[in-house]
Image (cartoon, rainbow, N blue to C red):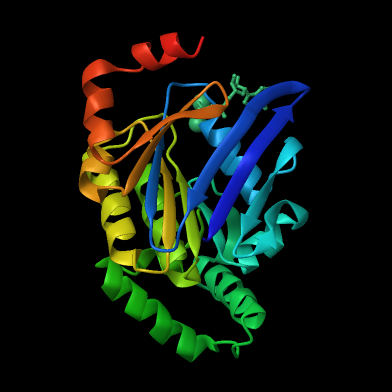
Amino acid sequence: MLLKVDNLQAEIDDKQILKGLNIEVNPGEVHAIMGPNGAGKSTLANVLSGRDDYEVTEGTVTFDGEDLLDMDPEDRARKGLFLAFQYPVEIPGVSNKLFMQTAVNAIREERGEPALDMFDFDEFAQSKIELLNMRADLLERSVNVGFSGGEKKRNDIFQMALLEPKLCILDETDSGLDIDALKVVANGVNALRDDKRSFIVVTHYQRLLDYIKPDHVHVLYNGKIVKSGGFELVHELEENGYDEIIQAHS
Ligand code: ADP
Ligand code: MG
Ligand code: MG
């Protein structure tokens, strides 16, 4: 098992948000997490990636055999956890290429692999660009400066490809995602999924899940996973909404 979350409870500003959450992710699996606004989906993503505004009060998280909650965010990233779409910071004057080369080399060092020089990194980046069927133009710009929403998304997926994580967590924001951005995300996930790499895709967009076809679908409500199923659950939710689930758990 790659990730095991057991009875996870977490709070922010003394308000309990996660109330005993369990989830298990095996290598190669794609899990979707759906649920109404305010359920705790982003909180789960943030707690897993180690954002420090959250306090974990109970439970354990094991990632690749190690205690995840014991690691700082940088260690989590070096061990192969990647969180996408968290409003990436803009860094004027630092080229996206240098930024990514540095990030890739930090991970290679952790794995005991030699650093990539500029030439090797170019070649490596080119192979990922081809895998994702993207253009390379974003590499020459400053990190995220002046990127449109779609460009940020494309860049995040590209970064995910370069870092070759074991577990990718995608936390889709609630704001508009046009069809092109949606396809960038779906194509990225589909191009990068393999029998070892796992994904947790947090989204409201049934359409995104139609493209991705997750192996497992969970409904998060009031800080817990209250229902799990296969891909068919996406359409069940689309037809019936969350009302029945909310009533059964309130
Ligand atoms: P979701 O992603 O499912 O919409 P969130 O994890 O963002 O839900 O939020 C879960 C709950 O935590 C909500 O009730 C929200 O108001 C609360 N919350 C989130 N962030 C904060 C914060 N920084 N301070 C206080 N409450 C927060
Ligand atoms: Mg929200
Ligand atoms: Mg959210």
Q: Residue at x 43, y 59 (%)?
A: 198
In the rendered view, would you say 16 is above or below 122?
Answer: above
Residue 86 appears in view: no
Q: Residue 95 location, x and y as percent?
A: 54, 68
- Between 117 and 2, the residue placed more toward the observer is 2
Q: Residue at x 30, y 17 (%)?
A: 241
Quick check: 69 left or right of 175?
right
Residue 214 appears in view: yes
**Quarter location, residue 210:** top left
- Between 138 and 235, the residue placed more toward the observer is 235
Q: Residue 19 location, x and y as percent?
A: 64, 27
In the rendered view, would you say 18 is above or below 129?
Answer: above
Q: Residue 204 location, x and y as percent?
A: 35, 31
- Between 132 and 46, the residue placed more toward the observer is 46
Quick check: 15 left or right of 171?
right
Q: Residue 193 location, x and y as percent?
A: 34, 63
Q: Residue at x 57, y 68 (%)?
A: 99
In the rendered view, would you say 5 is above or below 72?
Answer: above
